[in-house]
Amino acid sequence: MNSGQISEQVFHSWVGEHSDLLYQFCRKRVADRETGRDLVQETFLAAWRNRTAYRAETSVKNWLLLILKRKIIDHYRKAGAPDPLPHEEPGANPFFDGAGHWKQGLYPRAWRVEETDHTERKEFYSIFDSCGKKLKALQHHVFTMKYVDGHSSEEICKELGITSSNYWVLLHRAKVQLRACLEKNWFIK
Amino acid sequence: MASKITCAEAVDYISRREEGKLTRGQRFRLWRHLAACSLCRIFSAQNKLLARFAAERPVADALTETDKDIIIQRVLGESQEGKTDSGSAP
């Protein structure tokens, strides 16, 4: 199929064949359903507008995924510049005291991680998602790019246009907040 | 050289260690801190779990048929209006 032949009917079949996969991919990387749906829609819109750029040597699936990945990064970038925290000032982090020790009352406590059945797993991940949504958007994006996509810190800084020191602060905060939230709402209720 | 690190620094080092970003001296300081600090040992274990949870997180919902129809209508609706490549996309 060359690009000139991408008819409305062909486009229909693209949506039919690939929209579920695109949505799954997207929702692994964005916290809420509406954003996931919007990004998939924008992906198909961009694909249709640029259908003359489609080359048959790439699979349609990979081409669409490439567009979606760009859309996700654009969405992440809209989270804006990080707080002006080029360096971690002592006392600025709510989890540590001025001397850099864990604050009393916020000590991490050991979790008992047990085998879970399907329902418990679903409940756990709904808590995990709600804890994720409590993070600042950019903290969440950094955490996701690191642990869902497995990108390096350099790649993430480049994609999001942030400095390395900002990156480490964002990741650090995402983790201490996420762990505290999971502890409070799941592991040690 | 062998100065001690704080818990806040240890947490930071733990993330940097995942990417092999610590110098030998930093690795040693982290190792010594973890040997002495049970709280940061707990954090270090939980750090691995957070990574696992993120990677294994399932997607609980899916596009509905209505969602797919809306995509098709929106995209092909635009093409019928002629190619109005406006910046109106949200």
Image (cartoon, coloured by chain):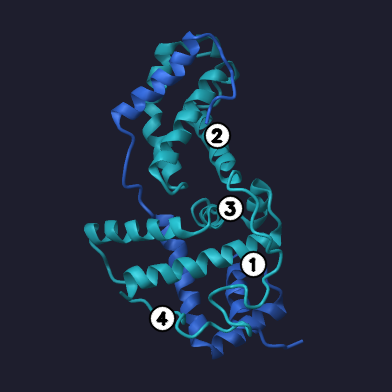
Please give the residue where the numbered disc 1 appears in the rendered image. B20
Residue at image position (35%, 51%) is: B58
First-in-chain label (4 vs 3): 4
Tell me, for residue A151, which label it has, or none.
Answer: 3
Mark 1 Cα within 10 Å, few/some/many (few <14, many 20+)?
few
Q: Secondary structure at mark 4?
A: loop
Q: Position of residue B63 (x, y in %)?
A: 34, 34
- Amino acid type of the residue that numbered disc 2 sits on in the rendered structure: Leu
Residue at image position (49%, 12%) is: B79
Q: CA distance from mark 1 to mark 2?
A: 29 Å
- Pointer 2 with pointer 4, Cβ within 8 A: no
Question: Chain A's shade in the image?
Answer: cyan
Q: Secondary structure at mark 1?
A: loop
First-in-chain label (3 vs 2): 2
In this rendering, the label closer to the viewer, 1 or 2: 2
Residue at image position (47%, 62%) is: B51
Q: Are marks 1 and 3 on the same chain?
A: no
In this rendering, the label closer to the viewer, 1 or 4: 4
Q: Position of residue A89 (x, y in %)?
A: 68, 73
Q: Quadrant of the N terminus of chain B?
A: bottom right
Q: Classify A125 as above or below A18.
A: below
Q: CA distance from mark 1 to mark 4?
A: 27 Å
Q: Secondary structure at mark 3?
A: loop
Asked whether residue A16 is in view, the answer is: no
Q: CA distance from mark 2 to mark 4?
A: 41 Å
Tell me, for residue A39, which label it has, or none.
Answer: none
Please give the residue where the numbered disc 4 appears in the rendered image. A109
Please give the residue where the numbered disc 2 appears in the rendered image. A66
